[in-house]
């Protein structure tokens, strides 16, 4: 088999890249290890920055999102018995975010790839990149017991944190930076009316809590939990009681509870791999970096990588201009590190750390008090939350 761009991974990064390239006439093949049902069963992110929203519209996959997604102009910070609103729209000159699940984004992308005759090979195992340092890289994989070779001009490794792309870069080339946080998030999805029209991020003496949603009838809630927490010990009742304890009184009083339809624990990690390019292979999304979820940046950061990489590949094929590909790692990492900083900061501000003393708790409260009483403080938070701009121009 032969194509122009071989894409490893059929998550949001790989599928969006595939769709954008296809619309520009660039041939590509996506190799996904899991079945489609498995990929579409994963409940993950829920908040889309405006940059990603516009990319999805430009990629002709924004129709259902525009119909069903919820535009949010602000969110709430709850701490020390107070609830303060961050007016995203007012503080950023009109920018907002869209609440629309990653699962739905992925479904829309799969449907679009199918409708346009895109080649997404599911259940492709043993995917292996070869000769990435040469002008003729290729991928091998096994599908239905048959080993196949896919020759390509470039490889995009969009294969998530545990993928094969980053692991196939030479150890002396790759530098990694990591922080693992001493807690996780216990998440519940329930077919209930969200407790508020906007998201609530709560800093509480018992730990962080977050009220989010997927639709006016589908709620997503999280509570900070221990890393070694046993999911079986979290009945729905225990979850709702813990959430209520951590929420502002008014929210706790109106919270509608119901059976969970999904319950899972996610660890929190900050991770960056540098560089994001080796030879003719380019890393994008979780393959290159992980953020703790507090700032809702994971999926959005994957999207900005795809933005830079797709533009660079288009310039290469349509104008024979390799500048974008040469600068891809530097350009992407500049935005990655800023999102890493914001996610780390918001995580540190909102969670209870196991070794946290009274002084540290006071510092968190003072920072939240300062932040929500200062227009400069709130503006800095708002402009990071809605998403920093993508870098434009030839310097890419
Ligand atoms: P992925 O979504 O991981 O997709 C990578 C794909 O590559 C997968 O489909 C995988 O099966 C495939 N793959 C892996 N290895 C191979 C291989 N060897 N060969 C072929 N295919 C392979 N972000 C938020 O903003 N908010 C959240 O609430 C949130 N919750 C999360 C919860 C969990 C449990 C996880 C893991 C992540 C969460 N994230 C969240 C992060 C967000 O979901 C990711 O940033 C986003 O999925 C990144 O997309 P991606 O396409 O780069 O990677
Ligand atoms: C969701 C997850 C987040 O990490 C976040 O900051 C906001 C919302 C969610 O799953 O809805």
Image (cartoon, rainbow, N blue to C red):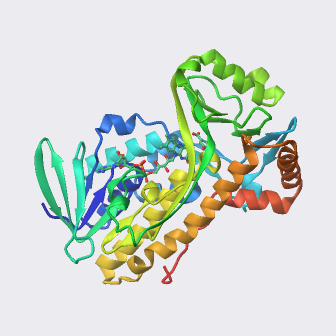
Left/right of residue 43 with respect to residue 296 in the rendered view = left
* The image quarter in which residue 8 lies: bottom left
Total numbered circles: 0
Residue depicted at x 40% and y 33%: 41
Question: Does the rendering let one see residue 28?
Answer: no
Q: Is residue 229 above or below residue 54?
A: above
Residue depicted at x 38% and y 67%: 171
Give x and y (percent) for residue 304: 50, 63
The N terminus appears in which quarter of the rendering? bottom left
Q: Is residue 355 above or below residue 288?
A: above
Question: Does the rendering let one see residue 287?
Answer: yes
Give x and y (percent) for residue 157: 35, 60
- Depth order, front residue of 157/255: 157
Q: Is residue 71 above or below residue 284?
A: above
Give x and y (percent) for residue 135: 22, 78
Residue depicted at x 41% and y 52%: 160
Query: Seen from this angle, which residue lies furthest left?
Result: 146
Give x and y (percent) for residue 138: 20, 65
* The image quarter in which residue 205 lies: top right
* The image quarter in which residue 379 lies: bottom right
The quarter of the rendering in which ligand 2 is drawn is: top right
């Amino acid at each position: 088999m032969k194509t122009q761009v071989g894409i490893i991974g059929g998550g949001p990064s790989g599928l969006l890249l595939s769709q954008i390239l296809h619309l520009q006439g660039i041939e590509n093949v996506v190799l996904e290890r899991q079945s489609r049902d498995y990929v579409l069963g994963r409940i993950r992110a829920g908040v889309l920055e405006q940059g990603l929203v516009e990319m999805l519209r430009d990629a002709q996959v924004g129709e259902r999102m525009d119909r069903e997604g919820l535009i949010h102009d602000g969110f709430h910070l709850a701490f020390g018995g107070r609830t303060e609103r961050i007016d995203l729209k007012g503080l950023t000159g009109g920018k907002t975010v869209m609440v629309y699940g990653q699962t739905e984004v992925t479904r829309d992308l799969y449907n679009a790839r199918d409708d346009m005759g895109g080649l997404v090979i599911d259940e492709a195992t043993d995917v292996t990149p070869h000769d990435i340092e040469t002008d003729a890289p290729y991928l091998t994989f096994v599908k239905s017991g048959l080993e196949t070779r896919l020759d390509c001009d470039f490889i995009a490794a969009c294969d998530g944190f545990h993928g094969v792309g980053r692991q196939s870069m030479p150890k002396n080339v790759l530098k990694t930076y990591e922080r693992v946080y001493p807690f996780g998030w216990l998440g519940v999805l329930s077919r209930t009316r969200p407790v508020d029209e906007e998201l609530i991020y709560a800093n509480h003496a018992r730990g962080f809590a977050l009220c989010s949603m997927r639709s006016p009838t589908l709620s997503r809630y999280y509570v900070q939990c221990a890393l070694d927490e046993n999911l079986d010990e979290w009945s729905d009742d225990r979850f709702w009681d813990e959430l209520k304890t951590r929420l502002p009184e008014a929210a706790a009083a109106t919270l509608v509870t119901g059976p969970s339809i999904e319950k899972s624990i996610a660890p929190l990690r900050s991770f960056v791999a540098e560089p994001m390019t080796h030879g003719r292979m380019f890393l994008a999304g979780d393959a290159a970096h992980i953020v703790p979820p507090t700032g809702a940046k994971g999926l959005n950061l994957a999207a900005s990588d795809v933005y830079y990489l797709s533009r660079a590949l288009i310039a290469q094929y349509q104008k024979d201009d390799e500048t974008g590909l040469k600068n891809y790692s530097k350009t992407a990492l500049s935005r990655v590190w800023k999102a890493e900083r914001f996610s780390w900061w918001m995580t540190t501000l909102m969670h209870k750390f196991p070794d946290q003393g009274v002084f540290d708790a006071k510092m968190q409260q003072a920072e939240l008090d300062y932040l929500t009483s200062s227009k400069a403080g709130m503006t800095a938070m708002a402009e990071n939350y809605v998403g920093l701009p993508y870098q434009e121009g030839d310097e890419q």
